[in-house]
Amino acid sequence: MKVLGIDTSCDDTSAAVLDFGGGPVRIVTNVVSSQTEIHQKYGGVVPELASRRHVEMIWPVVSEALEGGSEGLSGLDGIAVCQGPGLIGSLLVGCSFAKALTYAAGLPLVGVNHLEGHLLSPFLLEREPEFPFLALVVSGGHTSLYKVAGYGQYEELGRTRDDAAGEAYDKVSKFLGLGYPGGPELDRRAREGDPARVELPRAYLPGSFDFSFSGLKTAVRLAREREPGVPLNDVAASFQASVVDVLTRKTEWAIRTFHIRRVALSGGVAANSSLRARMKEMAREREVELFLPPPGLCTDNAAMIALAGYHRLRKGERAGLDLNPRPYLPLGVPAE
Ligand code: KG4
Ligand code: ZN
């Protein structure tokens, strides 16, 4: 069974073909067209420019994904499209395009939650996680911790109460004049900096699996005003140490609380070198299995949408031509 996945939730146009024909899943193609250059000069994603670029790129990106699969549309068994959460204009392009393809080719269609795509991306690895596992999804729009009992069975243990971790990276970077997107740049600079140079808070929120990164952002600003001469690399390293400490410690706490010995990391911030190193260290110490997709599968991509879509299609789920994008689309059920 071959599935085409399409993701246009934010500022990347992406299409992928996955082959589920026995044995481990095979990524036949995974094409991502980035819009970073367009949004860079504004210091963040401009929604209207994002949708216009999606309109230009959707056909070339989908064609490239299909051509790499050699058999084109006729070799497919289904189409999965990201339905939300995301920017309404961006989502609309992907959903409309997927519906048109479905209609033209007579293929089944399914709508996928972007967060489910991230959460299941560790299943693109050679060694798949077994259920149940803990999933930390850390991206530009979301930071949540889930208990995953099976496909489609997601219990949200906690989520950010304000900014997502990636959003904090992007905003701190903008404030420091380091450009967009902030994650990769701060990650690079942090490697050269002293993480103990600037004293910053850690929002552990005891008794809750929720997160909070907005106070940290303000603390960086205040520290900068107090001591403007601190090298940027040290500010980056100190900021990153706070984010990584909180994400790692709270995951560790969930492992102890729920006695679940498998942890999967996903979302753009899971590409962060320090978070990856710390999580590996923690997993080794606590003797838990860690599932960490390569950086290219942590950031937005359509392979994860095809994968999540495949499991929905297999269960018989189908979307009609009335499928609409949903900018706010929660995933799973909140923990009691
Ligand atoms: O998952 P993603 O591609 O898109 C969303 O669904 O939001 O995540 C994008 C976010 C951005 O905030 C970006 O700054 C962050 O992931 N990011 C990183 C790194 N690479 C991307 N954050 C920290 N370190 C990185 N290396
Ligand atoms: Zn994402």
Image: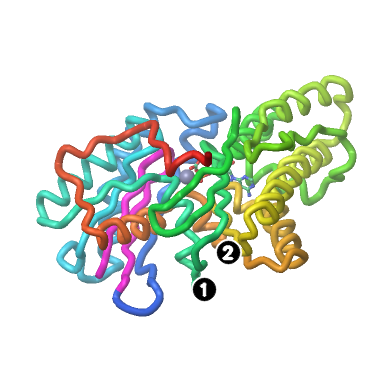
Label 1 SS: loop
Q: Main secondary structure of the magenta part?
A: strand
Q: Are marks 2 and 1 in contact (CB under 8 Å)?
A: yes
Query: Is the CB atom of the residue marked by disc 2 within 8 angstroms of ligand 1's nearest atom?
Result: no
Q: For mark 2, what is the residue? A: 291
The extreme bottom residue here reads 23
Number of residues whose C-alpha sits closer than 10 Å to that of mark 1, classed few (under 14), some (14–19) or many (20 or more): few
User: Can residue 31 be found in the magenta stretch?
Assistant: no
Seen from the viewer's position, the closer of residues 49 and 190 is 190
Give amino acid for label 2. Answer: Phe
Question: Spatial distance from mark 2 to mark 1, Cα to Cα?
Answer: 8 Å
**Who's the residue at 63% across and 54% down the image?**
258
Number of residues whose C-alpha sits closer than 10 Å to that of mark 2, classed few (under 14), some (14–19) or many (20 or more): many
The N terminus sits in image quarter:
bottom left
Q: Is residue 32 left or right of residue 98?
A: right
**Who's the residue at 71% across and 41% down the image?**
243
Seen from the viewer's position, the closer of residues 39 and 90 is 90
Visible residue check, residue 140:
yes
Q: Is residue 185 left or right of residue 230?
A: left
Query: Residue 269: horizontal and vertical position, in percent?
Result: 60, 47
Please give the label number shown on residue 196.
Answer: none
Seen from the viewer's position, the closer of residues 234 and 214 is 214
Give amino acid for label 1. Answer: Arg
**Who's the residue at 49% across and 69% down the image?**
128
Query: Residue 176: horizontal and vertical position, in percent?
Result: 72, 29
Visible residue check, residue 31:
no
Which contiguous range is marked in magenta?
A: 1-20
